[in-house]
Image (cartoon, rainbow, N blue to C red):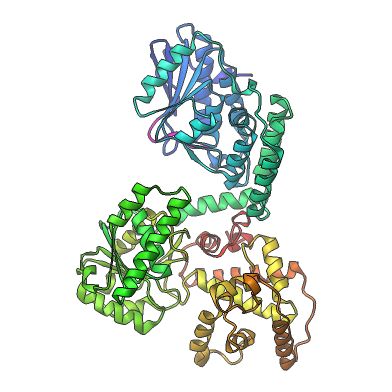
Amino acid sequence: MRAIDSEVKPAAAGTRFSDTVSYRMEHGVLVVTIDNPPVNAASATMRAGLNCAIVHAGITEEVRAVVIIGSGRSFVGGADIREFGQPMAEPTLPQVVELIEASDKPVVAALNGVALGGGCEIALACHYRIASRAARIGLPEVKLGIIPGAGGTQRLPRLTGTLAAAEMIATGRIIDAEEAQSLGIVDKVTDGDLARQAIAAARRLVVTPPRRTGELAVAVGKGADVDALADKVLAKARGQIAPAEAIRLVRLAAEASLADGLAEERATFLMLRDSEQSKALRHVFFAERAAAKVPGIEHVEPRPVATIGVIGAGLMGSGIAVSALNAGYRVICIEQTAERATAGEKRISALLDRAVASGRLDADGRADRLSRLEVTANMNEVATADLVIEAVFDDLTVKTDLFRELGRLVRPDAILATNTSYLDPDAIAEAVPHPERVLGLHFFSPANIMRLVEVVRCDKTTLEVLATGLAVAKKLGKLPVVSGVCEGFIGNRIFSAYRREAEFLVEDGALPQEIDKAMEDFGMAMGPFAVFDLAGLEIAWARRKRQAATRDPAERYVEIADRLCEAGRFGQKSGKGWYVYPDGKRTVDPEVTSLIEGSRAAKGIQPRGIDAGEIVSRLLAAMAAEGDALLAEGIAQRASDIDLVMINGYGFPAHKGGPMFAAGRS
């Protein structure tokens, strides 16, 4: 492997090989520390420094072995994706990785924290790997629309076998140190002094030839097992290219030489890096970081929150309660009656039981969560809460009456949050003293699973309250996106435009099943009419009836959904909606087709054939146009926030970047 010799700095020059790589000598071991905050990304300066370190070790007699360790909580958190799309400065990561593996002196990776992407590939090239128990290891490149590009697809299966490697790389799953050891990725896990133990291991390895991962044979998994994994992964990928390429390359590791496998991996990586899917996923990556930047709150300290009150222990309230319990909060859940409180507690316990059954939670964790939970019908118990989130029926009178009562019960500094989907939170806030402590926290169902929370900034919400809402949402493990006040906020307002255009398409000539297929082929998790049936048609029907008196009579309006509701067709819950559901299976219903044809005829509409391309383009255009309006009105801060809401709340495919990105708006 060719070293980038022009970058080599002799040891006598100081204690640094580059701005981000330092070193010290200890008992003949060159201890190389990567210090490139916040995550020790494999930037150009980091790669150059690491390259210098390995070259220096090779030409310096006093150096008998090398230990590579990270500073802070990261070993190496991955590539610096800000360099994507730019000319790649040498040394490239593959060059550095191959130099490490080719070293005649033992190189030990001391995994002090996350070793992801390029960080994992550096570790795989080392001759021995020791990890702290806090380490997390993975190759999550598929989440950016690419595959590992510095040997990950070829070296990992040489340690784990093809099945485990294919699963890790194709899903991007990150594993803990114990699992990494069980798979053969890590040689040792320690709770002790990691650097000391790594140095000791390096000194022991001096007397034996380096164990080079690339020279190991690949343990081939059963073909049927890998095929089954591929089927499962590709079905979930919904058109994303990178997972399929990852599995192909892992299989290649067992068939080709290391050199050939690495060459094919690099060519595939470069192809995917420049693809539209990767550009879209990188847009989403940066959008998530931008969403956290809210003008005005940069130096605002959130209020301390230890106890969260949840009003309502139904499906939404129980999910919110579980999220809060998982985050370490004490939770007081209020229901109307003792019977409902008992049912709510059982519902929360069942969600925790499900987490235990899936392996995401152990028995001690379940017991700890339940010890911090109180479910009661005594509203006075909520008086100790620092933050109260209501999750009751979405009716303005119900919610304002509740907030009026909460205003009498809670402390003046307690924050009150409404989970309303469509109602005006400013009107709700006026029901309480100090309306400046009210905001919206719009969770998505199931709240313990769905990542998105719209943090709604009311007219009088203070910056401190807004900052607290964002901080709590982040602690819950959610992705908070700030929205201004309007009916439906960001997500439901965009979704209403999507629904409206889908119904226009039906009147114009497309059938629900044709529209659903077009959008599912595009990458949506479900087509619009399947979603309508899943959510229940009566919610949107009630909203349309509320709006009827103020609707512009000249505005186009499709009555088909109203006719379905009038016939008792409310979706899956009633066994029929836009579709019929015998045995729970979604099935096209000729009665709906007849109703559609009758509605068209009554309006004198001559239906025409509409192909999938027009269906997709019209629906995307409707979403983007509504997004433009949200931006113009100041409801959304940035186009990328809208993309995040639609991806994380409504199943828009991340590898298409969101409706605003797809329309060239962001």
How many tags in the picture?
0
Q: From what the image shows, is residue 208 above or below residue 524?
A: above
Most foreground residue, 162 or 371 = 371
Bounds of the magenta span?
71-78
| Residue in the picture at 59% in, 37% down | 164
Q: Is residue 603 above or below residue 421?
A: below
Question: What secondary structure do most residues of the magenta stretch adopt?
Answer: loop
* Residue 142, picture quadrant: top right
State the quadrant of the N terminus.
Answer: top right
x and y, in percent, of residue 26 in the image: 38, 13
Does the magenta portion include 77? yes
> Where's residue 512, x and y in %?
69, 75
- Residue 114 visible in the current orientation: no
Residue 512 visible in this rendered orientation of the protein: yes
Q: Quadrant of residue 665?
A: bottom right
- Residue at horizontal 51 percent and vertical 72 percent from the top: 492
Q: Nearer the viewer, residue 573 or 542?
A: 573
Q: Which image quarter: residue 395? A: bottom left
Q: Position of residue 76 (x, y in %)?
A: 48, 33
